[in-house]
Image (spheres, rainbow, N blue to C red):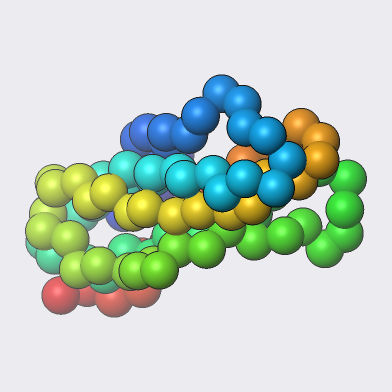
Amino acid sequence: MAQYAEIIEMMSPAEAQAGNRVDITVKIKNKYPSTIGIMVGGVLEYGVTPWPGITFPTNWANVAGGATHFFGGYFTMPDRRVTIHAYSYYYAKG
C-alpha cells in the first residue's frame, strides 16, 4: 500500500491495433493531509528489453491533501499484447 500517493484507477482501451496511438489515464490520490508533489510514470511489458515507456506530457502536479489528480498519457501499440505498468511517486511536501 502506498504511503502518500496511490494509483486508484487506470483507464485504457481493452484492445488496439498495432501502430495506433493508445491513450491512457492514471488517477492518483494524495493520501497525505497536506499538498504534495506527485509524479507519474509508466512502461509497457511485452517481451522487449528495455521496456518502452509511456509518454505523459504533464507527469507531475501539486495535489491537495485527500484530492485526486488525473494524468493523461499515450503510447504506440506494438504488434503484440502488452501489460501496462504505471507508477506514482511523491517528491516533496507543499
In the picture, the quarter occupied by the C terminus is: bottom left
**Foreground of the two, 85 or 81:** 81
- Please state the horizontal and vertical placement of residue 56, each as a whole percent of the image: 45, 63
Choose top left, top right, bottom left or bottom right for residue 90.
bottom left
* Figure disc tally: 0
22 is higher (above) or lower (below) than 60:
above
- Please state the horizontal and vertical placement of residue 88, each as a whole percent of the image: 44, 55
Question: Residue at the location (33% across, 54% down)?
Answer: 71
Q: Is residue 61 left or right of residue 86?
A: left
Choose top left, top right, bottom left or bottom right for residue 49.
bottom right
Question: Residue at the location (44% across, 55% down)?
Answer: 73
Question: Residue at the location (62% across, 45% down)?
Answer: 20
Q: Is residue 15 left or right of residue 78?
A: left
**Foreground of the two, 36 or 27:** 27
In the picture, the quarter occupied by the N terminus is: top left
- Please state the horizontal and vertical placement of residue 64, each as a whole percent of the image: 11, 58
Asked whether residue 88 appears in the rendered view, the answer is: no
Question: Residue at the location (76% across, 32% down)?
Answer: 81
Q: Is residue 21 left or right of residue 46?
A: left
- Please state the horizontal and vertical placement of residue 17, each as a whole percent of the image: 68, 34
Choose top left, top right, bottom left or bottom right for residue 84.
top right
Asked whether residue 67 appears in the rendered view, the answer is: yes
